Amino acid sequence: MDCPRCYALVADDHRSCAECGMSLVGSCRACDAEVQARANFCHHCGSDLRATRGGEDPRPRPIVAPPGRRTRSADGDSTENRQMTVLFCDLVDSTGLLETLGEQYWVVLSAYRDACKMVVDRYEGQVAEYVGDGVVIYFGVPIAHEDDAQRAVRAGLGILAAIRGLSPRVERDYGVSLEVRITGDTGPVVARSSGNGGAPAAYGRALILASRLKAVAQPQSLVITDDTHRLVRGYFQTRDLGPRDLGRIGRVAAVHEVMRETTARSRLDVSLAFSDLTPLMGRNLEVQMLCELWEKVRSNRSGHVVLIGGEPGIGKSRLVRMLEEHVAKEPDGWLTSCFASPYYTNSAFYPIVDLLERVVIQFRTDDGPEQKRTKLEGWLVQCGLALEEAMPLFNRLLSLPGKELDQLDADPKTVKQKTMSTLLRILLARSVEQPVLFVCEDLHWADPSTLELLDLLVQAVAQSCALVVLTFRPEFPQRWNTVGYHTQISLSRLGREPSAQIVTAAAGGRPLPPAVLEQILRRADGVPLFIEELSKMVRESGLLREVSGRFELAGALPALNIPMTLRDSLLARLDRLGGAKSIAQVAAVLGREFPYALLRTVAATDDDDLLAALSQLVDA
């Protein structure tokens, strides 16, 4: 059987878990017979043990709601079906550490736990439980992000790095070294959140799988299942460990060790890397407009700003990519692009720092501080900047050590203003030599300092030969739309014809059966990303068979599930709705169309609150 706390495999005749020490036996309060901790009824007298069991029931409560629907108990606790990525992290040879350290073990254990939590908090995960030397970490519960699997893997790599940094200090002070194993899986769980603010709990196969992978992971390694790997493919360099037998849970198709991050910054980067980018459909007017604006900037030698807005998955980056490909064909064009990141919303100038380190100066992961300083000096000389003025600013910007830092003005505001004016000078100087395309994407995640720099750039670009393209989601507040040299492009959802063209392209150029096509178009509702992912899921599901160069249904057509690749994104959007989320969940049970009166009756709320919630859902 499985331990209900840590999910370790326990022999049927064991009375406690060898991993976490939890007792696996109890007694029936009716007849005093000994029973297993996970039993629902007493084998001797038939009494219901669930009603009399002391403490929390380790199993999920019965769920009668459909996926995504929330149920609420009398004590205020709520339960719902969610997708979650879980990490298990445990110390290597913790028993040996305990024997060596004695009472000092708790000092070391506390430092290890603090190191783990600091990394998890950075990526907005949840430390769900400490089980002995193990740390159980949730991503997607209680709050979802559209990239929870990525966040989990980044956190896992971050914990490995943190332990590498902590171990020498522990070895110096206590004479022992630290190593960890980290394992992870993604899948559906039943998640329970406490009405009194307590820690959330989750139950599901993903937790068992992640726990069992500890038998596969080597010290100081991060190992994930194929389901998690499918969600993070391209963002990380991995090593295929092949299929593995995990005991009673069965054989898993593939296991992967995560080595390091790649340079991919978006879904578009990943699609380009794997050559599975579908053609852009339904955006001919927008592409033509962007290309014409670029040619106008080139010929008139006067700058322009383009603001591209749209919901997630609508095709903002894909549209920008078409412009970049056009500019790349020009012999005199110079283009550069950067991205804001949800992981660095409070890191000053992060998109610019990432651009400089990754593309412009080209720091390598194995470069030491002196190598980075040498590369930085060379680039500053190329830009025509005086090193005595520029090196202190860029050492601070790029977090490099150096005696020049002592020369900086003590006032942070002055340093910030000098940094922004220097960066602006570099970009505008380039536009004197050749036409420049500067792209900054995902500004809804941009830090305040980056937005201030863009304010200066937008003000100055009219007198330059530069096209500045900025992309963002609808929640980004209106900015820069009052200048006379800007163009606003708001991307709407696609119509039926371009949507169907994407389905065919994603199916390898062969049409799908009409019933399948209709269901994809209805569920995707004109969002290109949803169309692509649903189409790919159908191709891989076994629902179709190829006959004479076309697809036919292999059997009855069921209702299409939401692809795993989209579940985190949809859950994140739901979680951001606040009180309107419960109305969305009720409406989902009623169907795509329903009378307002029926929703009001089922939701059991007054008209003012219901109309406000519906308005919020429409805006979302």
Image (cartoon, rainbow, N blue to C red):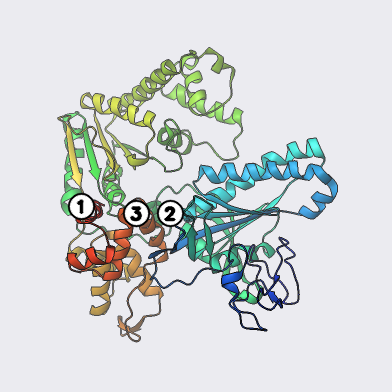
Residue in front for this viewpoint, 246 or 590: 590
Relative placement, left or right, of 577 versus 150 is: left
* Residue 144 image label: 2
Tell me residue 549's x, y (percent).
30, 81
Give whichever of discs 3 and 1 has the lower sequence position: 3
Q: Residues within 10 Å of mark 2 (few under 14, many from 20)?
A: many
Image quadrant occupied by the N terminus? bottom right
Tell me residue 91's x, y (percent).
71, 52
Query: Taking 106 as reference, is 428 above or below it?
Result: above
Q: CA distance from mark 3 to mark 1?
A: 23 Å
Tell me residue 302's x, y (percent).
19, 28
Query: Taking 460 as reference, is 496 above or below it?
Result: below
Give whichever of discs 3 and 2 has the lower sequence position: 2
Give the secondary structure at mark 1: helix
Q: Mark 1 sits on what residue?
A: 608
Residue in front for this viewpoint, 467 or 563: 563
Give the secondary structure at mark 2: loop
